Image: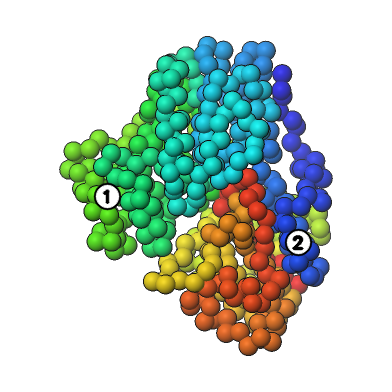
Amino acid sequence: MNAIFPFLFEDFLSSVVGTMIITNKDEVASSELRTHALDIIEAGIHRVLPEITMNITLEYDSTRNVLKIQGEEHDLSQGRLFVIGGGKAAGRMADVLLKIMGKERITDGVINCVDTGYDTQPIHVVKASHPIPDDEGLYGVERMLTLKGQYSINEKDTVLCLISGGGSALMPSPVDGIDLDEKKQITKLLLGSGAEIYEINAVRKHLSRVKGGRLGEFFSPATVISLIISDVIGNDLDVIASGPTYPDSSTFSDAYAVLEKYGLILKAPKNIVTHLEKGIRGEIEETPKKLNTCYNYIIGENGNALEAMAQRAKDMGYSPYIVTAEQKGDPARVAQYRAGEIQRGVYEGYDVVLIGGETTPKLPENPGKGGRNQHYAAASLLAMRDYEGDWVVVCVGTDGSDYLPDVAGVIVDKESLVRAKGQNIDVQSYIDRYDSNTLFNKIGASLVRTGNTGTNVGDVIIYILA
């Protein structure tokens, strides 16, 4: 029997101290405040790694062949077990699952993720692309769907679905009449439009054979159990990875309205607009609104990371305050708003301010190079310049990629302003061009690198105020 280990925060923090997630720490930890801020960030990311989240939430009784998830038991003794899924954390999740359950229990499986190298046999790992889908992702989904006919999967069997942030792009399967290039085009348009993730996914779900509950519906009457690491604000199950195993609350009309709202009707591929119009007229079946054989569990989310960061900060002698795990909006405007709160004394009595969520930039026609966290940091650099005390701000994507795969985020402080001024850098001009990566390469000692972390719960931000 592989029992769940008793999770104590003291044990967790002990395991975190000294853990290197930030690969260029020596380069960017040039002061005590910077070092502390990066240590706290690492504690947050460590908390939401699959080996932590899955061992906290899963317990497998090999004697009875029962899988307990967050206290609920699922009897696997009547049939076979298959593993499918996708997302930035899917590979690491599969690796941990096999350590918990053992390889011999799983009949077959296919997952799509951004990296390979995991010893996950009999689960096959397909390396696919994010944030723009590719042919490998399409191939992986086809292999997942093939499992049903290959093994005659039935009501006695269980399909375990590993889902995490990035799953929408990593699990492409366009409906008939729409090809992958058209899906890529609409994805790029939506990502650059300023649309919220739930709006983007409303469109994706109505162009897919597996999103919006259709993957769960496809494997019916088998029991489908999804283990989910959430990167979505509010942890909305029908939004995470476009809800492949959860009933869809959106409609064809909602999807069409998103394109209208952001002026994309004439820019979108004609086949996509035509498909949505057919759905509105009832010529194409809606996504499922009820799934009786599907069970969905969120096993990791942004709030977990913030709580771990707060505890690490306390142990270092700070007084932390968690503002929200649901920050959204334009990154520059939100950065200015948070800096204004700090300078007005909204968080008086606290010297560490913690925020999670995911902002959404609306890109100009010819943007420069960067990502939402880099843009947030650039705006923070100017917004915090009148703060009288010392300060440091770090904002990173917990997956290790701030749109650019080799950059997780940015660390800035008063010294960053000094270096920018010394080089006669016009920071605002880089913000206006959405060229924050070029800005921070010029300033130096700013870009935070982790590589692929193996998880994804959105972004985390820390302000340390002295």
Residue 372 vs 270, above or below: the answer is below
Please report the residue visible at 48 percent of the width from the left and 52 percent of the height from the top. Answer: 131
**Could you tell me how far apart the alpha carbons at marks 2 and 1 are, in whole angstroms?**
45 Å
Q: Earlier in the sequence, mark 2 or mark 1?
A: 2
Q: Are marks 2 and 1 in contact (CB under 8 Å)?
A: no
Q: Residue at the spot x=53%, y=27% of the render?
A: 109
Query: In the structure shown, which secondary structural element does the residue marked by tag 2 occupy?
Result: helix
Residue 191 in sight: yes
Question: Is residue 8 rendered to the left or right of residue 425?
Answer: right
Tell me the number on the disc at residue 118.
Answer: none
Decide: few, some or many residues near mark 1? Use Cα within 10 Å; few <14, some 14-19, many ≥20. Answer: many
Q: Note whether residue 246 is visible.
A: no
State the image quarter where residue 101 is shown. top right
> Residue tagged by mark 2?
25
Q: Quadrant of the N terminus?
A: top right
Q: Is residue 178 left or right of residue 49?
A: left
Residue 215, x across and y down, in percent: 41, 32
Tell me what residue is drawn at x 57 percent, y 29 percent: 123
* Residue 26, x across and y down, in percent: 79, 64
Given the image, on which type of amino acid does mark 1 rest?
Answer: Ile
Task: Tell me the kind of residue under disc 2.
Answer: Lys
- Element type at marker 1? helix
Q: Position of residue 150 (x, y in %)?
A: 43, 20
Q: Is residue 464 left or right of residue 338?
A: right
Residue identifier under label 1: 272
The image position of residue 210, as x and y in percent, is: 39, 36
Q: Vertical placement of 445 versus 80: above or below?
A: below
